[in-house]
Amino acid sequence: MGVLSEGLTQVLILVASLVGIAFALFQWFLVSKVRVSGESGNGYSDRLIEEEEEGVDNFDVSLKCAEIQNAISVGATSFLFTEYRYLSIFMGVFGAIIFLFLGSVKGFSTQSEPCTYSKGNLCKPALANATFSTIAFLLGALTSVLSGFLGMKIATYANARTTLQARKGVGKAFITAFRSGAVMGFLLSANGLLVLYVSINLFKLYYGDDWEGLYESITGYGLGGSSMALFGRVGGGIYTKAADVGADLVGKVERNIPEDDPRNPAVIADNVGDNVGDIAGMGSDLFGSYAESSCAALFVASISQFGIGHDYTAMSYPLIISAMGIIVCLITTLFATDMFEVKNVSEIEPSLKRQLVISTILMTAGIALVSFLALPSEFTLFDFGTDKLVKNWHLFFCVAIGLWAGLVIGYTTEYYTSNAYSPVQDVADSCRTGAATNVIFGLALGYKSVIIPIFSIAIAIYVSFSMAAMYGIAMAALGMLSTISTGLAIDAYGPISDNAGGIAEMAGMSHKIRERTDALDAAGNTTAAIGKGFAIGSAALVSLALFGAFVSRAGIKAVDVLTPKVFIGLIVGAMLPYWFSAMTMKSVGSAALKMVEEVRRQFNTIPGLMEGRAKPDYANCVKISTDASLREMIPPGALVMLTPLVAGTFFGVETLAGILAGSLVSGVQVAISASNTGGAWDNAKKYIEAGASEHARLLGPKGSDPHKAAVIGDTIGDPLKDTSGPSLNILIKLMAVESLVFAPFFATHGGLLFKLL
């Protein structure tokens, strides 16, 4: 037994999650002290007028900021409510499928049955597993939706406040944007932990000593979280990129006006898209990763010594790691907001990157403490039918290597997507000879950027599996996500800063203010790429852990790639990320086509629009993006949700295992290269626009031929980095967790085609 008692473990997890929520609300309170004039659209009537005006911007500009913020908030809220109406139908239908499929495993029997792993004991009936898996699915889905919605609300609440704080200096604006991101980070991680902790304790009232059944049903929580994340990511990604591509192609390339010029009809839809795609979508995505890695670790532990011996503290090790992560990230956040003040533009990016390093170092110490207090010095873990003897320091290394692999992936991503380094500068330089060479250089950069992350993931997998089997891999994934509060704060900071820059442009603020918001946005662009790197890296580990849990639960002795059943699954699985990417990119293309036509129509038919005498019809562009994204998100979502059900039912568990392995291997590569290619093209364009170095000034200014070539590269990269790339990590996780939840059904009734032949 570990040093911590069961009572103390319960208190620690509960207190950490409540402290996380309280800290998020405190950060929200600090952000709300920046005053807004007029109604902000978020239910607040503060006054947004600055004491320290710079002379250029007057009260009218403050009112304009509040007006634009209101339009963005209304657009984002309207889109999410419409999307959630669609998803509520999906939740009901898919919840019924889970219940019917799992209930039918034993003919909806209400009789207790012998336990699979705890020999000689009786476990709860299959009908209970069906019922509680469905409840867990709904809880996970609701928590995921809440995570995304709260993130969007704080982002739309903070964007104009960040703009107005830029009048006082870049440091004030940075703190406002970062604190707003921290609200999302801490609310998401603390809510996720709290709901999981409460669910386990409530389920335990029924399950009692049947921990095997309890943690089997809890896997539904991860499925619910990830299924909502898929639709949130794809729908939000299509929305934001349809608006962005439409605004860029007509505004920048054809009309030669700035990115966020208020004359551009698509500009409000573009800013709404940042919130529904990059904030709400990313929030749901990382919550899904957290929920799935926790569920995978808990399931494997429940069929090991911890679960069979009813050691609550050791069993809760994944939850204690997450609780420690919240405390560590809380301390780390103070370094950015209170200990080191950002005084000039050059300090923004180092301050954000410092957050990653500080949280990783502090968390390493936290993992060591938790490992020695919560775990027995020696214990056995389930290892595909055998027991593996493991020591507590082995698990410390498993979690720590996942944590440090995340840092390596983050820094590699930053190197390949930041315009401070040669890869992006080379891409920018290639624009001298036109868009074609820009595209060639960008694709090469994306492919090359896959190498180091894959080696990092491979090393993490080898070390963690060698030390603690599949449980070790699940804990490595959780280690990578243990600093999720800081990771999300950094990630959400990017779209908030992007919106702040857009509001500054639309409100007609001075060039000096716009320079500050541009600097915040450029740093945020890189950190958003780092966030995507973390999400993809953790997805690889999470899906492998879920794959191991699925193989165990489905009763597969070994996955042999030389058998035809497995190999056909492998090759089809490797194809799925390409099919999915084709669907999502075509969706963005067709939605963007409608947007381009609408923006052109308005420029051609509204008299005085180009001269600034008339206002564009923003609402129509918002409607085009909303309708297109909600319609286009269904086919890619259906592909991911139906593949495991069809493969498992008609081809059996061996073929499904092959599909999961194939999609994992190819999906990670495609996701990393797509995200980094898009990020590099975006920052190459910003490098030319900023003109911060002699080399950049030679390529500029805005409107020059190299700049137009860079805009085309950025436009091609938009669906890669914000729709297809980030959605792929959900594809590989979601298929794995869905297979795990339905494993008993597939093992009993699956393989219909092979049975008939």
Image: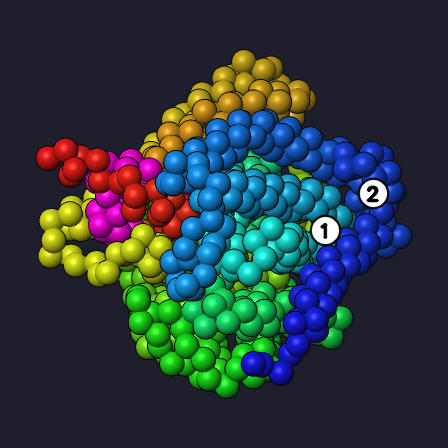
Amino acid found under the numbered disc labelled 2: Val
Q: Are marks 2 and 1 in contact (CB under 8 Å)?
A: no
Dot 1 surroundings within 10 Å: few (below 14), some, or many (20 or more)? Answer: many
Residue 620 can be seen in this image: yes
Q: Is residue 650 magenta?
A: yes
On screen, residue 96 above or below 697:
above
- Helix, strand or loop at label 1? It is helix
Residue at 37% across, 69% down: 382
Q: Which residues are magenta?
A: 644-664
State the image coordinates of residue 564 (x, y, percent, origin top left): 11, 49
State the image coordinates of residue 243 (x, y, percent, origin top left): 51, 32
The earlier-in-sequence mark between 2 and 1 is 2
- Find the distance from the CA under tag 2 to the CA under tag 1: 11 Å
Q: Residue 162 got which mark?
A: 1
Q: Is residue 313 left or right of residue 414?
A: right
Residue placed under numbered mark 2 in the picture = 36
Q: Is residue 345 magenta?
A: no
In which quadrant of the rendered image does the C terminus lie?
Answer: top left
Q: Nearer the viewer, residue 561 or 684?
A: 561
In which quadrant of the rendered image does the N terminus lie?
Answer: bottom right
On screen, residue 567 above or below 333:
above
Residue at 72% across, 37% down: 69
State the image coordinates of residue 602 (x, y, percent, origin top left): 54, 18
State the image coordinates of residue 424 (x, y, percent, origin top left): 39, 60
- Helix, strand or loop at label 2? It is loop
